[in-house]
Image (spheres, rainbow, N blue to C red):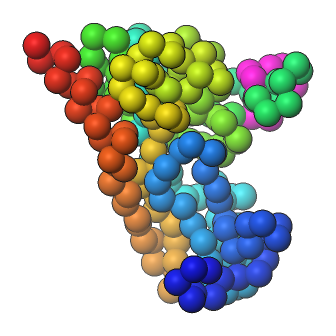
Amino acid sequence: MGLGYRIATSGAPERQGIVQRLDVGTSGVMVITKSEHAYSHLKQQFRDRTPIKTYHAVVHGRLDPSVGTIDAPLGRHPHHDFKFAVMAGGRDSITHYKTMEAFSHASLVEVHLETGRTHQIRVHMSALRHPCVGDEMYGADPTLTKKLKLTRQWLHAVDLEIEHPTSGQRISFHSEYPADLQAALDKLREVDSL
């Protein structure tokens, strides 16, 4: 790695040591291991669904109900190679959400995943007709994306809790919003306060 740290060599060559990844355009906390033991142990945790993953997303509109669970299977989109869709016969996918703050045209939501499918939050929110702001691949309004000066979806992995692979102790990690997402959120708050 760039800072001279050694990482585990397990995993695909382009992502050695990376236990769980984030979608392109999603920021936040993720796990990279230094040893093969840690890699195997943490991979098993993710298979067993014991890590607690918390995301924040800004989505279009106001969710009704403001708290809920989306239990909808996901599979590869039949007509677009890089997209996923809610579809019969897809893999089980469960997303829990809670509105944290509602604005005129968008909502800040906290999201917890039971499963970790590719594009899961993005597809589930889009299926509810509340795509992540900035996520034009899944139906975001480009006008709001432009107003908020976003170049990606407003989706951030804010917290991750795992079991330490050696001590067995539960440990947690937190990631603050990056500047572009914070600026977009501030803009939404500013417009609503006028």
Above or below residue 114? Residue 142 is above
Residue 167: give x, y in percent of width and height.
50, 86
Q: Quadrant of the N terminus?
A: bottom right
Q: Residue at x 55, y 11 (%)?
A: 129
Magenta stretch: residue 160 in it?
A: no
Magenta stretch: residue 89 in it?
A: yes
- Tell me how many marks there are: 0
Residue 109 seen in the current view: yes
Above or below residue 114? Residue 43 is below
Residue 48: give x, y in percent of width and height.
68, 58
Above or below residue 21? Residue 194 is above
Q: Residue at x 57, y 43 (%)?
A: 25
Residue 188: give x, y in percent of width and height.
26, 23
Q: Quadrant of the C terminus?
A: top left
Above or below residue 122? Residue 60 is above
Q: Residue at x 41, y 66 (%)?
A: 172
Q: Provide the major secondary structure of the magenta segment.
A: loop
Residue stretch rendered in magenta on the structure: 84-92
Nearest the eye: 39 or 22: 22
Q: Quadrant of residue 23?
A: top right
Nearest the eye: 111 or 107: 107
Q: Quadrant of residue 193?
A: top left
Q: Is residue 194 left or right of residue 37?
A: left
Nearest the eye: 18 or 165: 18
Residue 122: give x, y in percent of width and height.
59, 30
Instruction: Specify the farthest residue to the left.
Output: 194
Residue 165 seen in the current view: no
Q: Residue at x 77, y 81 (%)?
A: 9
